[in-house]
Amino acid sequence: MLDVQQFAGVELGPGTLYGAITRLVDCGWIRPLEAEERRRPYRLTAAGRTHLQEETAQLERVVKTALRRLKPA
């Protein structure tokens, strides 16, 4: 939760975060690793990496379009 808050500036509640983690695991995009004390780390899978690359490319297209439209005529 702290990592998300630090890089995205968004504070998530445990229910929101764990619901998202469950969906990512169910989709096969992340997998749980061995627990470290109270923490449960996850690893991005090959399918997750592919999906993330596709989503990032789509976001990049949106940003490029927005930047073009913001330029003065």
Image (spheres, rainbow, N blue to C red):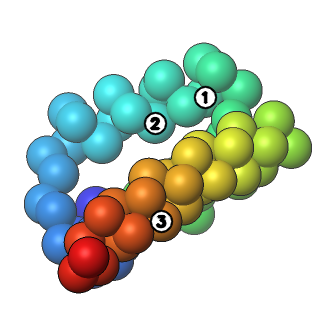
Q: Position of residue 57 (x, y in %)?
A: 64, 53
Q: Is residue 71 above or below residue 42?
A: below
Which class describes the residues within 10 Å of circle 1: few (<14), some (14-19), or many (20+)?
A: some
Q: Residue at x 18, y 72 (%)?
A: 9
Q: Is residue 28 above or below residue 54?
A: above
Q: Position of residue 67 (x, y in %)?
A: 36, 71
Q: Is residue 3 above or below residue 31?
A: below
Q: Give the CA separation, mark 2 to mark 3.
A: 29 Å
The label shown at residue 7 is none
Mark 1 touches mark 2? (CB < 8 Å): yes
The residue wearing badge 1 is 25
Q: Residue at x 64, y 21 (%)?
A: 27
Nearest the eye: 27 or 51: 51
Taking the image as shown, residue 17 lies to the left or right of residue 59, namely left
Say which amino acid is labelled 2: Ile
Earlier sequence position, callout 3 versus callout 1: 1
Check the picture and name the quadrant holding the C terminus.
Answer: bottom left
Mark yes or no: residue 4 visible.
no
* Name of the residue lying farthest toward the front: 73
Q: Residue at x 33, y 28 (%)?
A: 19
Check the picture and name the quadrant holding the N terminus.
Answer: bottom left
Which class describes the residues within 10 Å of circle 2: few (<14), some (14-19), or many (20+)?
A: some
The residue wearing badge 3 is 64
Which class describes the residues within 10 Å of circle 3: few (<14), some (14-19), or many (20+)?
A: few
Nearest the eye: 17 or 52: 52
Say which amino acid is labelled 3: Lys
Q: Position of residue 20 (x, y in %)?
A: 39, 33
The label shown at residue 21 is 2
Q: Position of residue 56 (x, y in %)?
A: 59, 55
Taking the image as shown, residue 12 lies to the left or right of residue 62, namely left
